[in-house]
Amino acid sequence: MMRRPLVVGAAGGVILLGGWFWLSMLIAHSDPRSAARETIGFGLALLVLLSMVGAIRNGSRQQRRDR
């Protein structure tokens, strides 16, 4: 059964951020607000990184198409 890449990516992102929050709570902080802020920062950084990678891949694909 084929799943949509967006759904699989979103589920993976939720699992990754949940794991990051849990790890942050376990190791570094006992304060949930601090761990939540760290998790939001990590999520935003991950989103920016993935969008940059997507833009680079689409740009190289466009260059190949233009040749």
Image (cartoon, rainbow, N blue to C red):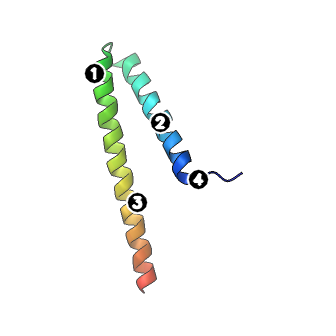
The secondary structure type at the circle numbered 1 is: helix
Query: Which quadrant, please, contains the C terminus?
Result: bottom left
Q: What amino acid is at disc 4?
A: Arg
Outermost residue, right side: 1
Q: In the image, is 63 to the left or to the right of 34?
A: right
Q: In the image, is 67 to the left or to the right of 33?
A: right
Q: Position of residue 50 (x, y in %)?
A: 39, 52
Residue depicted at x 56% and y 46%: 8
Q: Are marks 2 and 4 in contact (CB under 8 Å)?
A: no
Q: Label 3, on which residue?
A: 54
Nearest to the observer: residue 29 or residue 41:
41
Outermost residue, bottom side: 67
Q: Label 4, on which residue?
A: 4
Q: Earlier in the sequence, mark 2 or mark 4?
A: 4
Q: Label 2, on which residue?
A: 14
Q: Residues within 10 Å of mark 3 (few under 14, many from 20)?
A: few
Outermost residue, top side: 30
Q: Earlier in the sequence, mark 2 or mark 1?
A: 2
Q: Residues within 10 Å of mark 2 (few under 14, many from 20)?
A: few
